[in-house]
Image (tube, helix red, strand yellow):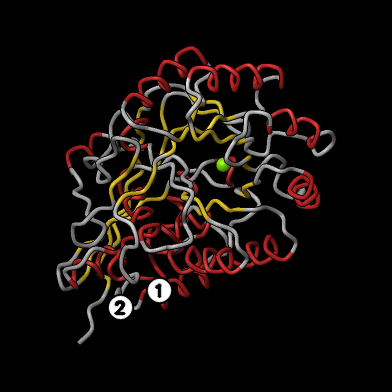
């Protein structure tokens, strides 16, 4: 007899973060909200999932909570948790959009599948092609002097990848920050992310100034919806362009490949809505000669672990990841950092399922009242 989903517990939590962040298209003050999901089965198994929506990407935690409670949970109760693809279809039929809510369910079901099999999730995805993933840290503190100090410390600890959030300050200040980073840390693998911050007009001339600092890539210079401008920038620049907000789904990846909107792509579970579409995006990107990068929103340990299992199993994901939130940004999380970040890498969890241990007292302590 097959197992069935008995209960889906939902927790809206708020975590303090270490410093304010400016990201061009959105500013984060001193805390972030997330939804933690626990799926429990009749066989006594439990799987954890996390939704970390961020308004610039279309959703907020309270809305995701409502979608899970009123729409996805009723569609899933009593169903077989092992039929993960069928459950994704149930979620797709229940509501359009809301990839963050859907991926929280998806990761909980993979966690259960791993626990049932006694294997880490990456083993169920075909096995790991890498055990560590190079870690990119983002320079996004409005206080740049503090960030430069942080960058020096990280470099001393072995970090080699930094991503600078550009486009929310005047261009001259972006150039100054890049100059300071290059002068202080010439060996950095430096990346630049506009988070949609440039208007298409004059973007190419602005970005030619940035190219002088030899960034590994320039991420999402213009807004989603301005794909013709994105393609023109990609054609004009020598520096690779990475698509983030312009590619959420496999069909958008197909367009990006066909129209050569970019040279590489950021894959985020929170955009894709599940392992199935995330792997499809990577397969299309790989066929188009576009390497992928492991992006994140304001994700804690559960989602970061889920991301690490995914990336571990994707040979095309050669640009590293930015899963620094659990260890470097969140002051408190509901589980110890499952990625053991340090020395410029994150480590792919080797425990069964997602390999996370949730502290239920901390889960209760971070709960948002109401
Ligand atoms: Mg980005």
Q: Judge the density around disc 2: few (<14), some (14-19), many (≥20) Cα neighbours within 10 Å.
A: some
Q: From mark 2 to mark 1, how far is it between C-alphas?
A: 8 Å
In x, y percent, where is residue 130?
Answer: 33, 57
Q: Is residue 95 left or right of residue 12?
A: right
Q: Nearer the viewer, residue 177 or 227?
A: 177
Label 1 sits on residue:
87
Residue 88, above or below 244:
below
In x, y percent, where is residue 203?
Answer: 78, 35
The residue sitting at 52% across, 63% down in the picture is 282
In x, y percent, where is residue 10?
Answer: 32, 52
Label 2 sits on residue:
80
Image quarter (top left, top right, bottom left or bottom right) of the N terminus:
bottom left
Q: Judge the density around disc 1: few (<14), some (14-19), many (≥20) Cα neighbours within 10 Å.
A: many
Figure quarter occupied by ligand 1: top right
Q: Is residue 214 left or right of residue 317?
A: right
Q: Quadrant of residue 364?
A: top left
Provide the secondary structure element on which disc 1 rests. Answer: helix
Q: Quadrant of residue 165?
A: top right
């Amino acid at each position: 007899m097959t197992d069935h989903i008995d209960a889906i517990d939902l927790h809206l939590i708020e975590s303090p973060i270490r410093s304010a962040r400016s990201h061009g298209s959105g500013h984060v003050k001193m805390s972030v909200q997330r939804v933690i999901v626990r799926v429990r089965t009749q066989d006594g198994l439990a799987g954890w999932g996390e939704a970390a929506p961020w308004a610039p990407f279309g959703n907020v935690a309270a809305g995701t909570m409502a979608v899970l409670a009123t729409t996805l949970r009723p569609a899933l109760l009593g169903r077989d948790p092992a039929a993960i693809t069928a459950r994704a279809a149930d979620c797709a039929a229940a509501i359009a959009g809301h990839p963050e809510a859907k991926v929280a369910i998806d990761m909980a079901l993979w966690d259960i599948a791993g626990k049932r099999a006694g294997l880490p999730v990456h083993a169920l995805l075909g096995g790991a092609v890498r055990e560590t993933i190079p870690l990119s840290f983002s320079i996004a503190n409005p206080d740049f002097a503090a960030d430069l100090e942080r960058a020096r410390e990280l470099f001393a600890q072995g970090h080699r990848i930094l991503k600078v959030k550009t486009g929310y300050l005047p261009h001259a200040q972006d150039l100054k920050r890049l100059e300071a980073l290059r002068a202080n840390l010439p060996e950095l693998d430096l990346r630049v992310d506009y988070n949609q911050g440039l208007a298409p007009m004059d973007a190419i001339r602005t970005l030619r100034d940035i190219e002088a600092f030899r960034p590994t890539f320039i991420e999402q210079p213009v807004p989603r919806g301005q794909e013709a401008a994105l393609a023109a920038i990609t054609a004009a620049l020598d520096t690779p362009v990475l698509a983030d907000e312009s590619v959420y789904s496999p069909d958008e990846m197909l367009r990006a490949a066909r129209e050569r909107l970019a040279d590489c792509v950021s894959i985020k579970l929170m955009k894709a809505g599940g392992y199935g579409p995330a792997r499809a995006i990577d397969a299309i990107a790989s066929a188009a000669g576009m390497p992928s990068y492991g992006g994140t929103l304001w994700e804690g340990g559960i989602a970061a672990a889920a991301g690490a299992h995914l990336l571990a199993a994707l040979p095309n994901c050669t640009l590293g990841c930015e899963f620094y939130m659990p260890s470097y940004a969140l002051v408190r999380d509901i589980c110890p950092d499952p990625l053991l970040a340090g020395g410029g890498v994150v480590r792919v969890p080797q425990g069964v399922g997602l390999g996370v241990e949730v502290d239920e007292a901390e889960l209760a302590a971070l709960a948002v009242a109401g």
